[in-house]
């Protein structure tokens, strides 16, 4: 795999390359405007896979040949086309497209959907995809829950900056009770831990997909601002913990 700088990809606009349905002649034709994950947080293996996919997409959009894409990245044209149309251009829960976030290894664009009723066994197994099923049935609940997870705390209420996951979990259970889930003994009320692990994992996924909001929730309003602030000398800071400040006496 070659680096992006060695492939002549200075122009990341789709206008001069291939015409792609849903991309060309739209605001997202400029790939530099695509939402991007925190690439510095990847493991080395995931970073290699991600950058290889990213290079392939840029090569495809710029109009490079099938031979060039296969040689540089090992992908066929049809595979890269599916990466773009079936992953990158899919709508993200935050209202944007997935963009480069869709190329991160193990990111699920279309959540698992159950075909059978959720009936966990005595050991608690058999509830895979239950949370996504519930959220799919109640889109307004999904929206309200994600808004709650990503909500920024007022800077003057320092004690409320770190919101415990248990509080979100209890709120979610209360909303399901209003919908009659507990009365009907539906998931998560038919499990030992009332879906705590699945719900907490979902919270983590929402925060991981929205690093700026996550920084505000976990570190307050100032932390969110520092993600986009510059130090006045070097390039703007774009990642959490990229800049370190030190007071010397």
Image (cartoon, helix red, strand yellow):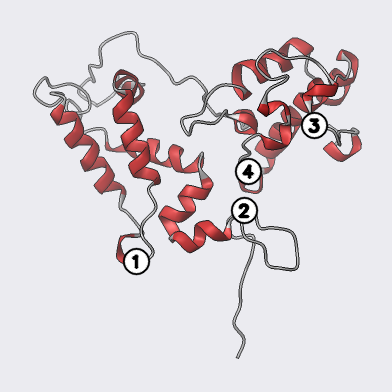
x and y, in percent, of residue 31 in the image: 72, 32
Residue hosting label 3: 12
Residue hosting label 1: 158
Of pointers 1 and 4, the one earlier in the residue sequence: 4
Comparing labels 2 and 3, the label whose residue is closer to the camera: 3
x 22%, y 20%: residue: 121
Residue hosting label 4: 42
Quadrant of the image containing the C terminus? bottom right
Q: Secondary structure at mark 1?
A: helix
Of pointers 3 and 1, the one earlier in the residue sequence: 3
x 37%, y 37%: residue: 146
> Distance of mark 2 from mark 4, alpha carbons?
12 Å
Residue 192 shows in this picture: no
x and y, in percent, of residue 13 in the image: 79, 29
Q: Secondary structure at mark 2?
A: loop
Q: Residue furthest bottom?
A: 249
> Distance of mark 4 from mark 3, alpha carbons?
23 Å
Q: Nearer the viewer, residue 187 or 55?
A: 55
Of pointers 2 and 1, the one earlier in the residue sequence: 1
């Amino acid at each position: 795999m070659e680096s992006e700088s060695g492939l002549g990809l200075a122009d990341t606009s789709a206008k001069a390359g291939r015409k792609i349905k849903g991309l060309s002649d739209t605001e997202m034709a400029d790939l530099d405007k695509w939402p991007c994950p925190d690439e510095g947080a990847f493991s080395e293996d995931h970073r290699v896979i991600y950058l290889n996919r990213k290079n392939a997409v840029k090569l495809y959009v710029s109009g490079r040949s099938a031979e060039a894409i296969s040689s540089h990245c090992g992908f066929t044209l049809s595979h890269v086309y599916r990466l773009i149309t079936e992953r990158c251009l899919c709508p993200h829960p935050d209202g944007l497209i997935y963009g480069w976030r869709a190329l991160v290894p193990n990111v699920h664009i279309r959540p698992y959907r159950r075909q059978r009723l959720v009936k966990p066994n005595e050991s608690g197994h058999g509830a895979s995809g239950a949370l996504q099923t519930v959220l799919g049935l109640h889109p307004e609940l999904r929206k309200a829950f994600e808004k709650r997870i990503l909500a920024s705390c007022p800077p003057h209420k320092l004690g409320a900056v770190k919101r415990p996951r248990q509080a979100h979990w209890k709120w979610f259970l209360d909303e399901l009770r209003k919908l009659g889930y507990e009365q009907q003994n539906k998931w998560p009320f038919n499990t030992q831990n009332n879906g705590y692990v699945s719900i907490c994992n979902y919270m983590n996924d929402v925060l991981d997909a929205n690093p700026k909001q996550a920084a505000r929730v976990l570190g307050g309003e100032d932390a969110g601002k520092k993600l986009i602030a510059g130090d006045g000398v070097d390039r703007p800071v774009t990642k959490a913990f990229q800049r370190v400040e030190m007071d010397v006496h």
